[in-house]
Amino acid sequence: MRSLPAFLLISLMVTMAWVPMVPAADSTVTVNTTWSGTVVLDGNVTVDQGVTLTLEPGTTVDAKTYSLTVEGTLNADQASFFSSTPPLTQGSHGQGLWVGLVISPTGIATLDDVTISNASAALRVEGTLNANGLTLNDAYRGIAIHGGTATVDDLTARAMDYEAVYLDSGSLTLDNAVVTDTAVGLESSGSASVTNFDVSQSGIGVRAFAGSLHIDGLEIDDAAVGIAAAPGADINISNVIGHDLSIAIDAANSDNLKIHQAVLSGQRMLVGVSVSGLELHDVEFNATLPDTRYAMDVKCSGQCVYDELTLLNTSRGMSLSGSGTHELTNSQIMASQQAIFASGAGHLEITDSNIISDGVGLNIQTPTSLLSTVSVALGGAQTTGIDVLGGVHDWDGISIHKSFQSGDTSSIGVNAWYADLNVGEFTSENTSIGMRLERSTAGVTTFTAHQGTTAGLHLISSDFTGEDISTLAQNHGVHLVGQSHLQVTNLTGTLHDVALLMEVSSTATVRFFEPTNTAQGAGDASGQGVLYYGSESSPTVNTMESYFLEETPVTFTDLDGQPLEANVIVHGFEFVANENGALTLPLSSSGSLIDATYQGAGVRVVLTGGYIGQSVQVPIIPTGDWTIPSNKVVILGARPDGASHQLTGSLTISDGAQLTLVHTNLIVPASESISILGNGVLEGEGSLIQAPSLSVSPQGRLGAVASVIDEESFLTIDSNVSWNCAVQKQVNGVHFDGSLALQPFCEVRQNEGRVPPQVSVLNDAKFESFSQAYVTVLDKGSPLEGALISVSGATTQTNSDGYGFVSHPSLVVDSSGETWYGTVMVTISANGLLDFISWDTNTSFEHTFMASTLPSGTVNDWLVLEKQWSPYTLASSLILSKDATMTVQDGVSLRVSNGATITVNGTLDVDEATLASTGSGARWGGLILGDSAGASIDLAGTTLVESAPAVRIDGDGSFSANGVFFARSASESLITVETGSNAAIQLRDSHLQDAGNGCLRVFQSTGI
């Protein structure tokens, strides 16, 4: 046995005697040279320009620790490069033992069936590389292209510490590559065209920072990130297969990322923090690993398009936010808890798509959305098809459906809160409530809600207008609560306890009310509301007030008896007469007020239901002076061409006459005037009157149409007004752009509106201008009653709607001169919180005070802090259990009381929000990562200040902070990692300052 080592040594010596030796110093190949057999480098070798080095098949090059630089030409066929130098570290797998092949800018390398092992960079390409059948093993980098051109067919790369293919600059053409066990499969900042790239067991499959990366045929298995993008990179990848991916696509803040025809699976599909250009076409993702976060979380600042997208088996499907536009078409989104959540300041469009969820199908909190042909399939009873908060939304072809469950009293087709909906066709099947509106408005052309428990349509302080409503088999077909109004042409309700239930203060106008098979006892319509209705049957109506509308023929002519195709409004319905001037109108036998106009000019009259032969003459503006006779109400509306109404003479409004302007302008010539006589009335809504002078009689009236007005309802008078009155007159909602002269003893009080630039008062006359402060106080959207509003010593309280207002003088002009009241302070007190607003009393203002509070103690479900109800206040410590999730949306401000903490054993997800103390030097206790192994804190773009400390990490779980601002921790550190913590901690692109005991205080742990 002892003779064996000697035999091996002798054999080795004999073998080495036949190995050709390169001189033991750096050398240059200056003539065409051929290597064969085994070649051992004893120094760096350079192939000179104009010289060709050829490696014959079977050649093996032992590079030791040296390099081979090609300034001329290298041709290698069936050769291999490696290093026999022993690794310096015990854990090395043989990488970085020699420099590698360096192809200089003048160099050309042609490699066929070549293997390169143990290099720092197997190939550094500054010149030209042509390779076919290239195998790279155990290196820091495989191919590193720095300004050169590489064309590679059939690449195999294994065990790369960094990138298998690294394109810093230059160009790459790569066909058929298999990469295994590498940090990054392909990283590109140049111009890359790749086909059939297969990467497995990698940190990142492919990544592009700049330039263009085009891949056709990409397969990624077992990677932390499949595809990573960056701004400035043109990325176009098609025919993708990915398995076992933690994040399939990291879109980051990319501006031109396109993925076509992909089948992916793993934990999360796509994450993007500020994406301005994204297109996904024919992409399928199957969530095979559990995650409480959204499979797709995209903050879009530009245009983000998802076409033929399929998400399967996700817990939460898509979170779409940012200021840009999200477009989802021809897609299917499946999620157990919430399929799509859209928020931020952008726009959402969904077309021809199916949404499947056992929780919430679609949650919309964007300012606008456009939905067309969208189907939502729901699972259990605690489900909502579409949940809308705020905004203005245009939808059509909306279908919500679920299987029937007799005990289901919770499911809702559409739930809208503080929203304005414009819907073409809507259908809900088997939900307890088809559509629920709270403090919202909806215009729905065709509404169908069949099979449920509670109500087909439920309005709470909301308005609904539509053409057709069909409800079937609920307790109530339509249920109105609070100051709600229903305006519909056809209402058909079948198999209800009550087809139309009206609570106190509600109103409804139904042209054709046709209930069938209503339960006996309560009546087809009942309650404490006011109902105007017509019917071809005989419904039982038991409301507080009801008025039957009879279909009555009416004709409309001009003053000469010629028929007019007049525009007519009656009981909220709008009609246009036919060419014979004929219409059939729903009229009450007690009289109905109608407005009839033609070319913007018209009349307001009372017509009676059931009387045949009624005719209305519609006046036109005459040439010359125009006098509106007594007891005549004339309306001027918008002209079809949008032009102003031009008079050619003076305007006189006789005693008892009235002129109403609705969203139009009336112009009187420079030499003419307007006179209001007796009890004449001149009023307007969103209109302008322009005349040299306007005189008002002692009993005359001037003002806006609405008693409670908004800025769009003001009447603007650009005229010098003279008013003669004996008692105080009220002027509501008028902007005076000309002077105002008050005759002796005339007192005028202006409520809201712009004060005249010049006011003159004679002999005890007086002018007062008052502005209003309208205040609404809400707690997470719910009205807060009893909040105190104080202005200059005057105090009022909010009512049950959370609403209150205070009047305050802005200007008083009397015989003693002018008094301006200027700016005052408004104080609001609610839920122990104070709000102070500086108010310029020259104009009225509206203010909504959010007194939103968070629950303290332990939370076990999903808590969402929505921007609409910000700021929020947390009075004492909050604990998120392992089953709880707290989501803080962009733009939210959370104020936490002194010493209070938020302990996370579940999931805390905070975007671009602010978490701070309540001020005055207070310091809250910060975020605590709890003991649960599944605890997760994810901060992205967050501002976290005035806490001591900001974050404390005790146990397991994960903490991630990306682009976070930490500051002002008093005497504590900002982030503390306690002894023995096993948490996974990631801190990236964040800023820490103003810490009392160091920004980071880290004890021995295993997680960083």
Image (tube, rainbow, N blue to C red):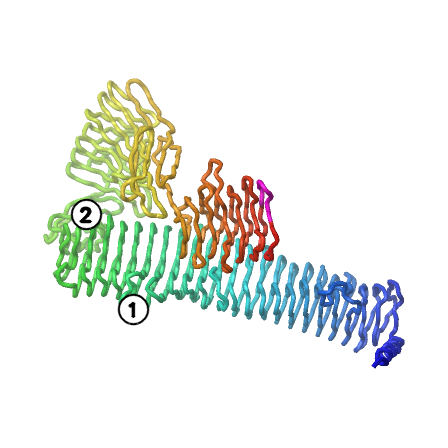
Provide the residue designation for mark 1: 404
Q: Is residue 159 above or below residue 535?
A: below
Amino acid under disc 1? Phe
Q: Is residue 795 left or right of residue 614?
A: right
Q: Is residue 576 left or right of residue 972?
A: left
Residue 594 is marked as 2
Q: Is residue 967 above or below residue 539?
A: above
Label 2 crowd (10 A; few <14 / some 14-19 / many >=20): many
Q: Is residue 190 above or below residue 655?
A: below
Query: Considering the numbered disc 2 on the image, is that residue within a helix, a strand or a loop?
Result: strand
Q: Is residue 607 left or right of residue 319?
A: left
Q: Main secondary structure of the magenta part?
A: loop
Q: Is residue 814 above or below residue 326?
A: above
The answer to which quarter of the image holds residue 230 is bottom right
Q: Nearer the viewer, residue 835 or 876?
A: 876
> Which stretch did the figure color magenta?
992-1001
Q: Confirm whether the magenta stretch covers residue 998.
A: yes
Image x and y of residue 688, in percent: 31, 37
